[in-house]
Amino acid sequence: MSSLVGNRAVVLGGSMAGLLAARVLADGYAEVVVVDRDRLSGVTTARRGVPQGRHVHGLLARGQQILEELFPGFTEGAVAAGVPTGDLGELRWYFNGARLEPARTGLICVSAARPVLESHVRARVAALPNVTFLEEHDIAGLVATPDGGRVTGARVRPQAGDGDEVTIEADLVVDTTGRGSRTPVWLEEFGYERPAEEKVKINLTYTTRHFRLPDESILHGDLSINPVSSPSHPRGAFFSRIEGGRCVVSLTGVLGDSAPATPEGFMDFVRSLPVPDIYDVIKDAEPLDDPVSFRYPASVRRHYERLTRFPDGLLVMGDAACSFNPVYGQGMTVAALEALTLRTHLRKGTEPRPLDFLRDIAAVIDVPWNISAGGDLSFPQVEGERPLMVRVMNSYMARLQNAMSRDGVVTRTFMRVAGLVDPPQALMSPGMILRVLLKGGRPQASAPWRAESRTESSIPKDVRISG
Ligand SMILES: Cc1cc2nc3c(=O)[nH]c(=O)nc-3n(C[C@H](O)[C@H](O)[C@H](O)COP(=O)(O)OP(=O)(O)OC[C@H]3O[C@@H](n4cnc5c(N)ncnc54)[C@H](O)[C@@H]3O)c2cc1C
């Protein structure tokens, strides 16, 4: 804490974005207070404020690297606590029903249940001497100067006791309350415009169940099996071995399709996946809970960077700024990248200037947004404009996905880009284009399996698998 830029920073929301913000703010403010409606201390299971925590959460490679940078020894600590890890390129990935040629990437997949990952991050943040948590407090609103030019604190309401509102004064308030953030409403109250919102409606559902395998040798050492949803094979799934000898399966349906949250419906959907691997692994496994569904109607990007006026003393980060289609696994890593951006601003030695910060994180958001929103637009049924660039990229990506079933170099390059480690330009180098052209024909054929058991009637007509 060599150069403090302020006395107190308040972080609204103590999930991943809030924790990572608190970590870097602790270097710039004498005191950091993290407020959340949930009880956080010691919690390692899904909580009310983060219901998506029940579902598979992959941490992208860049996210793992940033966690390691912000919390040295993080990965080793997680492994010591029983979290399995593996090489991201060596997971069992399937695109369009074809298995990707495995490739050693050196990129680490940390395979923890989402609440467990959060608990490891929280433990490291809680160990910082100048960070405190105000748990089980509802955030009611912001406090600002009479002219609305500066946010000076937040109003919070304890869930226990008389429930009277308390104001916490702050030099800086950071909104990390997630997708349901009320900053657009608060801005309006203070006389500002709301940010423009961009939406890509994917109408996605995750349905998740945990299992214990009778014998893990059936996995042949694999950490994860991921038949990824694509226009030709819209039904997808993520299977991961996680801590505590457990496995988690999240089934993904798009455009209104969804795996039922019943044991029978769940297994029917598993049988309808393009490859049999997950069915084979879990058919004799012990279910540890009932299936649970989570609906995700649309990716939402709030373009704060386009505003011309914004109050001092307020920043927005994480899902509050942009919520990505979760199948691309980007949210936590983007929050981590934004935390690094915040650190850069703090290192200037002065309080972050909100519009400068919001423009800088917009630049961070651009690449993952183009990957996920662009990928969603490859489904013809998804509404949205498809400029020439998007059409060209999607047709190139379809060939590239095919090439990955034959060429580990393509797999490795793709994993580095999808993991937000390398820029997308890495996929467009002359050498890569040549490989994609040579090897990107039809994907390696994999015979349809158990076609008779597909529950065709449950797949909406407009997403029915062709071919
Ligand atoms: C089904 C699903 C799967 C996902 N899979 C992945 C994945 O594989 N990889 C990945 O990186 N990301 C994934 N994500 C996204 C990821 O969950 C988020 O990006 C990540 O949690 C960061 O979000 P956040 O911290 O900004 O907000 P959130 O996680 O939404 O947290 C908001 C916090 O604010 C608190 N809060 C909100 N309002 C109030 C209030 N009024 N008063 C008090 N407290 C409040 C909540 O309790 C919560 O703790 C997935 C999302 C979904 C929906």
Image (cartoon, grey):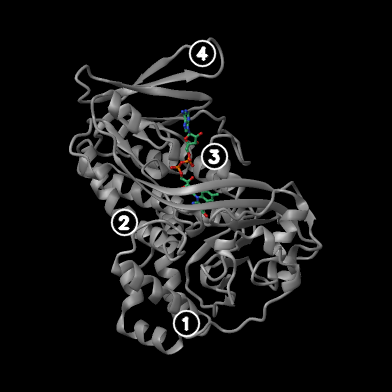
- 284 vs 97, left or right, is right
* Residues marked 3 and 1 touching at CB (< 8 Å): no
**Cα gap from disc 2 to disc 3, whole angstroms:** 25 Å
**Cα gap from disc 4 to disc 2, whole angstroms:** 41 Å
Q: Which residue is mark 1?
A: 403
Q: Secondary structure at mark 2?
A: helix
Q: Which mark is residue 50?
A: 3
Q: Amino acid at mark 1?
A: Ala
Residue 92 in picture, x, y percent from top left: 60, 71
Q: Which residue is mark 4?
A: 163
Q: Which residue is mark 2?
A: 366
Residue at 31% across, 54% down: 364
Q: Earlier in the sequence, mark 3 or mark 1?
A: 3
Residue 401 in picture, x, y percent from top left: 47, 76
Residue 367 in picture, x, y percent from top left: 33, 60
When asked about the image quadrant of residue 356, the answer is top left
Between 389 and 77, which is closer to the camera in this rendering?
389
**Cα gap from disc 1 to disc 2, whole angstroms:** 26 Å
When asked about the image quadrant of residue 190, the answer is top left
Q: Amino acid at mark 4?
A: Gly
Q: Earlier in the sequence, mark 4 or mark 2?
A: 4
Q: Earlier in the sequence, mark 1 or mark 2?
A: 2
Residue at 71% across, 55% down: 246
> Which quarter of the rendering shows the C terminus?
bottom right
Q: Earlier in the sequence, mark 4 or mark 1?
A: 4
Mark 4 surroundings within 10 Å by alpha-carbon count, few (fewer than 14), some (14 through 19), many (20 or more): few
Residue at 46% across, 87% down: 439
**Cα gap from disc 3 to disc 4, whole angstroms:** 23 Å
Q: Secondary structure at mark 1?
A: helix
Q: Total label count? A: 4
State yes or no: Cβ of the residue under disc 3 lies below 8 Å from any atom of ligand 1.
Answer: yes
